[in-house]
Every structure is written in C-alpha cells, then in structure tokens.
Image (tube, rainbow, N blue to C red):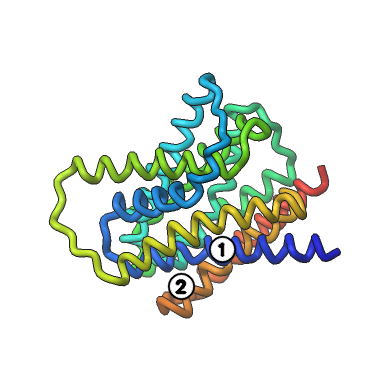
Amino acid sequence: MRRETNGALLALAAAILFGLVAIAAKTTQLPPLLKGGGAYLLAGALLAPFLRNARIQRRDWPVILLMSLAGGAIAPTLLFYGLQQASALHASLLLTFEMVFTAILARILLHEKLPPSGLIGYSLLLASALLVAYASATNGGETSLLGVALILAATLGWGLDNTLSTKLVGSYEPHHMVAIKGLIGGGAAILVFLLLPHDALSLATNDLLAIAYIGVLGIGLSIVLFYRALQRIGATRTSAIFLPGSALAGVIGARVILRDPLGVLQMIAGALALAGILLLTRDTAAK
C-alpha cells in the first residue's frame, strides 16, 4: 500500500513540474531555439552521468537520432514559438493532443490496433483542440490560430518521439534515452541558433531561472519522477495521474500566475480533454 501511495505521489509531482513548463516559458522573452535547446541540453547534462554504463547498439543509432531531433529539438522549439502567439492556458489544453498523434503514428508505424472506445477518447481530445482553435479565432485574445497550429505541430513531434521510443523499450534504461535525447536534441537546437543571425542577448535573472526550471525541474526531474512512478504503479496508473495532472497544473498555473482568462469555452475544452484522457487510460487498464 505504501509503495502504491509513493508511486501516485511521484506521478503527481512529475505532472505538476511538467505542467508548469508553459508558464515558466512565458516569463522569458528568449528566442525559442535558445529556450528549448538550452532547457533540453541542461536536462541531458543533468542525466549524463547515467550514460557511463550505457551500451548503445549501432543499429539503434538512426532511431535514436531521429527520436532526439523530433522530441528534443523540433518539438520544444515549435512549442516555444507557439507560446509567443498563444496563452499558457490554451497551450496546456492543446498539449494533451500528443496522445492522438502517438496513437496515429503507432497505428501507421507499429501497426497497433485501436479499439472503438479508444476512438471515442481520441475524438474527445480532437474536439477539445478544435474548441480551443474556435475560441482563439472568435475571441481575438492572446492565442492566434498560428499559435494553435505550432503547438499542435509540437505534439506531433513528441508523438513521433513516443512512437520511436517504443522500439527501444526493454533494450535501454529510460534515463539513458532521456540523457541522449537532451544532449543531441538540445545541442542541435543550440547549434542552429548560433548559426542563424540574431541580435545580441543579455540574459536577465528571470531568463536564467526560467531555463533552469524548464531544464532541471520541468524536464529532467519530472522525467526521473515519472519513471520512478512507473516502477511502482505501472504505466497505466502513472499515465492516469500524469496526463490530467499536468494539464490541470498548467491550466491552474496559467490562471493564477499569469492571469490567463478562463471562459466557458475553455472550461468545456478542459472537460473534453479530461474525459478523453480518463477514457483512454481506463481503456488501457482493461487490456
């Protein structure tokens, strides 16, 4: 019983840390490439000591490189570009769409079957994303349709990352993959930033704090806690806590810290996303 309680608390802590990433990102005006690359590179460096015992097979490097670029460079950069034109509250709701792209890509690349109840769950997440897009188009607020599209594109990148990671499950320790993804993906984003023309930067304290939070806590520690929870309560129960928990933490954080408006459409979108996640996790548990 104590093991299960600890696992649930670890999953909840991971969810809260990750859910506040979008809020932290909104507190700094650093370029998205530098913001995403710096955070992932920092997370990779944090976990790099674990790589001492890692033995990566040569045949797996193409998959690892693609996974690293998709999930550690492209997706976070798209998210932070999207956050320039979207509220953190809307971003937190849209990020749940990662489950939809993961399912679609798993069906295409891994030939995984999707039960009818799963289709309902993913349809609810799709409805939530469409409602956020509608609210953005009609309310004329902080979120634009381009911002919505960029965040959804980021979830596609992470969906590809998730699908590719499935091929490596059982062969390597999760923290090894996270360290490699952070070092390669974050390093690639920083390299592109340095090669592109940009204005001179002056880093303020809040910029450094934001990068430190996203990299060390929102990505690094959150992932470590997530996998610790997996060891104690399994993937289904961990996901059932983490997914709605991170979305809820993001919505509450955006409302309380950033004062993002929370209207009827946003509440309906949140309810649809929560229902879709709960249905999907319950469907997984029934297998």
Residue in view at x 49 percent, y 43 percent: 179
Q: Say which element carries label 2.
A: helix
Could you tell me residue 26's position as x and y percent? 36, 67
The residue pinned by badge 1 equals: 247
Type of the residue with mark 1 = Ala
Judge from the rendering whether residue 60 lies leftward or rightward of residue 283; answer left or right: left
Residue 133 in sight: no
Q: Quadrant of residue 189?
A: top left
Q: Say which element carries label 1.
A: helix
Question: In the depicted view, which residue is nearer to us: 203 or 108?
Answer: 203
Indicate whether 223 appears above or below 61: below
Q: Residues within 10 Å of mark 2 (few under 14, many from 20)?
A: many
Judge from the rendering whether residue 166 lies leftward or rightward of residue 257; answer left or right: right
| Quarter in which the C terminus is drawn | top right
Mark 1 vs mark 2: which is more N-terminal?
1
The residue pinned by badge 2 equals: 254
Q: Which mark is residue 46?
A: none
Residue in view at x 63 percent, y 48 percent: 122
